[in-house]
Image (tube, grey):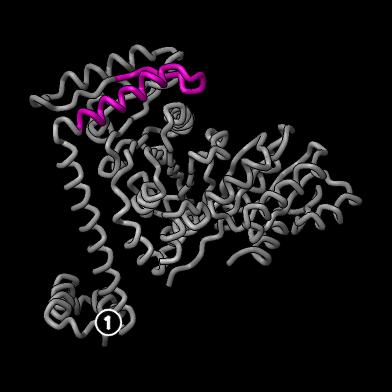
Amino acid sequence: MILAEKILQGDIRAAARLMRDVDDGFSSALPELMALYPYTGKACIIGITGPPGAGKSTLTDQITASFRARGKRVGIVAVDPTSPFTGGAILGDRIRMNRHADDEGVFIRSLATRGALGGISRSTGEVVNIMDAMGMDIVIIETVGVGQDEIDIVRMAHTTVVVMVPGLGDDIQAIKAGILEIADVFVVNKADREGADRTVRELSMMIEMGSRKEGEWLPKVMKTEASRGVGIEELVAEFVTHRDFLSASGIIHRFTEEKNSTVFSEMLKERLFNEVYGCLLDNGELKRIVAGMATRSVDPYSAVEEVLERFLNRPESKAA
Amino acid sequence: MAERKLRILVGKPGLDGHDRGAKVVARAFRDAGLEVIYTGLHQTPEQIVSAAIQEDVDCIGLSILSGAHNTLLPRVCDLLKEKKADDIAVFCGGVIPEDDIPGLKKSGLKEVFTPGTSTEDIVAWVKANVGC
């Protein structure tokens, strides 16, 4: 737990290194994360998502400046895609926000998706936790540019912002399922462009069409011009309003419960799978099953049942 | 089981606005399977060093065509030392006169690439000289 101690004392390099250990899947990160966990859960987490080029990074930069002016410390997790062919990535979100690089109250970390499909990387939750333990008041997660269905962010962020720009589609796009359902706040960025008011109208109509229960949050549609800083103060004020609503209505408890349950089940799923799969891989059984499937002498359904039976009934076989 | 993924920061210190070279090199690193943190134009040495530390990169590749290399590049190396982060390797590319290269290397730069260098050579150098 060398890194965890240093992180709690404010060591930036230790934090950066643990984030990398987590991202690279080093088992040495596990005890560090265990040690940090009691110090997490304090930060207010804001998720920013939307299509590529909508202005998410520029908006993140402006929101950060606004929170800094309010004396808050800000962590930013910026996710960009990994190439499916080479495994490489160009992480370019810093271009828009690097003016905060030498501000000690801001910590920015770029992550590559490394094959994850929900708009964020598998390590995002842990990196957010590390920033939380570092004492960041606000953590902003900027997803990769998403299309319609990449909505992992919603389970992680207290407030989810969906950034749209004028001219991306008609009002039927706006009533489709997916990313438009997850917003706590809609932002129509580049609001100086033609069609901005129409986009605002269509989104507002979509919100009105939805049936909302008494006491539920009603998302607002807000206009911004991130590159000129227009509409940012109003947007940040809306974050505060939403956060207050979550606390006052008690919805925050439900959110936290669901989030924790997801975190635990995902972790359990991954560990169990890796444990069992690794075993089958090592003892050659996987090969036999796959070969058997090719000649149809083994079917995958019974193979899975058999494996399960053995692992659940005889845990000691794990060591074999 | 776990393997380190090489991470590199590519940026342009100072005031020149010619970023085509930096983009070509960044793309070459991407295609070689590296994670490239691209900070873009007009970076101060302070911003570069701070970003490199937050991103926990293995090395920093700086493109400079302004002629200010003798001022800006040693400053990056000095700041890294100051922050006890001089395990992060720094190299540069750009129009650097032959005569300036020994001085730059003495100040801490690990390598200097001049015009005409192929991207393959740069990638090969990074893979051979940088990493955990």
Give the residue pinned by disc 1: A285
Residue at the spot 39% in from the left edge and 38% down from the top edge:
A140
What is the three-letter code of the residue carrying label 1?
Glu
- The quadrant in which residue A254 appears is top left
Q: Where residue A87 appears, x then y in whole percent?
A: 49, 56
Q: Nearer the viewer, residue B54 or B21?
A: B54
- Is residue B11 found inside the magenta-colored segment of the image? no
Pinpoint the chain carrying mark 1: A
Q: Which residues are magenta?
A: A221-246
Q: Is residue A135 visible?
A: yes
Q: Looking at the magenta stretch, what is its main secondary structure?
A: helix
Q: Quadrant of the C terminus of chain B?
A: bottom right
Q: Dot 1, crowdedness within 10 Å: few (<14), some or many (≥20)?
A: some
- The quadrant in which residue B57 appears is bottom right
Q: Is residue B28 above or below residue A277?
A: above
Q: How many marks?
A: 1
Q: Where residue A259 appears, x then y in whole percent?
A: 22, 48
Q: Nearer the viewer, residue A231 or B75?
A: B75
Residue at the spot 60% in from the left edge and 53% down from the top edge:
B8
Could you say whether the residue bearing mark 1 is in a helix, strand or loop? helix
User: Quick one: which residue is furthest to the bottom in this view?
Assistant: A320
